[in-house]
Image (cartoon, helix red, strand yellow):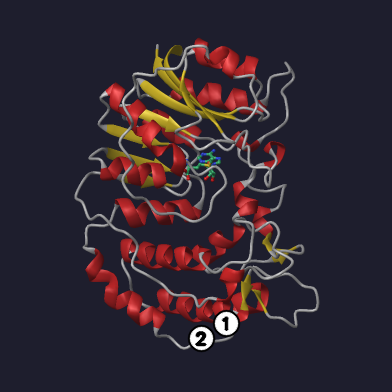
Amino acid sequence: MTRPDSPPLPPSPPTEGVKYAGSKLKLLPLILELARRTGARHLFDGFTGTSRVAQAFARTGHRVTANDTSVWSEIFATCYLRNRESAARYQELIDHLNALPPRDGWFTEHYGGDDRANGEKRPFRRHNTMKLDAVREEIDRLSLSAVGKAVALTSLMLALDKVDSTLGHFSSYLRAWSPRSRHQLRLEVPALFPNDAEHAVHRADALVLAPNVEADLAYYDPPYGSNNDKMPPSRVRYAAYYHFWTTVCLNDRPALFGRVNRRADSADTASASPFEEFRKDAEGRFLVIGALDRLIRGTRAPWIILSYSTGGRATAAQVRELLTAHGRVEEVVSVDHRRNVMAGMRWTNEWSRELSVPNRELLFLLRKG
Ligand SMILES: C[S@@+](CC[C@H](N)C(=O)[O-])C[C@H]1O[C@@H](n2cnc3c(N)ncnc32)[C@H](O)[C@@H]1O
């Protein structure tokens, strides 16, 4: 059912993030509107990724608990949520990092390329990995606070994301250099919004953390069912796709393997998340559905917004069963992926049917109990 009388939604406040499969940037106005209907003041963003959803909620006066298993997500969320200083306070640090002379180092050896690269594809041009080598060493050398370091690393990742030669992830690199890779790496102070709210940031399995978070509303955007055709739903593995951001954050010079120089600890046999499983259990239920079932059961918040993309591994019938088992679906928004978000948006109470339509991004507002 469409609601033609719905007033236009207010735009979301500005947020920042790297290119990310499954980023909810375009859906932020809808997620904020669903949350407004619950009156929630404290949001638990269980799979925060870029932290854009967490940023939007924090900027609109909510208290936020952000979580993800990825180290880069923890860095982004720490930078935006836990910072209490004005952006101007970091300008000197960023100017200092920009002024460092480029130098050859570990990142250049493994990720920097030039035009003579005899067929070897690399995600960055050499002049930019040489800057990266200099800046990353200096960030460790300076005695920065945890938040100061998160601000510097976020600034570095946002700058690298503007000069990469990838499709937006690091599991394959472009054959020909992207035009943006020619530009010079240049750090900027992130768009900070200093605040003294009681935000919290965790790097944990959402299944383990959820029972300990006393929020009013949980937003769950697990990795299953990505509709990005560069990232088939059967194999959505964030640790593998974004291994490079892990290494930028940790600067730990890990063992590498394969053509794209992936971290050994991001191999398929390591670091699997139950939400990235595409297999079924003995009863024929997708393992991801079992994980979601346990997650919702363990959630203390009385309200849950669940993101779900149709066409993924979790089938319509299993998602329907899951939702109805845990409470009442109060609202559903369905967005057609192929159209501009607002033009392709429908509020619907025929959500059961919508689950079987391909290319839909669904947002379920579930009242638990
Ligand atoms: C679809 S993305 C989230 C995107 C995010 N909403 C945004 O707008 O950027 C899914 C995220 O789940 C994380 N993840 C995977 N398994 C997890 C788990 N067991 N607990 C917490 N986070 C997990 C991945 O690292 C990834 O960042």
Crowd band around label 2 with a 10 angstrom C-alpha radius: few (<14), some (14–19), many (20+): some
Q: Mark 2 and ligand 1: say if the CB distance to the nearest ligand atom is below 8 Å.
A: no
Image-quadrant location for residue 59: top left
State the residue in front, 202 or 177: 177
Quadrant into which the C terminus falls? top left
How many residues crowd around disc 1 within 10 Å: few (fewer than 14), some, or many (20 or more)? many
Which residue is disc 2 drawn over? 102
Q: CA distance from mark 2 to mark 1?
A: 8 Å
Residue 94 position by quadrant: bottom left
Residue most toward the right?
118
In this rendering, which labeled residue sits more in front, label 2 or label 1? 1
Q: Residue at x 68, y 24 (%)?
A: 286
Residue that appears at 68% across and 37% down: 233
Q: Can residue 321 be seen from the camera position used here?
A: no
Q: Is disc 1 placed on a helix, strand or loop?
A: helix
x and y percentages locating residue 223 in the rendered image: 58, 38
Looking at the image, is 228 positioned above or below residue 127?
A: above
Dot 2: what SS?
A: loop
- Amino acid marked by disc 2: Pro
Question: For the point 51% across and 76% down, which residue is it?
Answer: 132
**Quadrant in which residue 247 is drawn:** bottom right
212 relative to 49 in the view: left or right? left
Q: Which residue is mark 1?
A: 127
Q: Are marks 2 and 1 in contact (CB under 8 Å)?
A: yes
Q: Amino acid at mark 1?
A: His
The image position of residue 357, as x and y in percent, is 63, 22
**Residue 144, image x and y in percent?**
33, 70
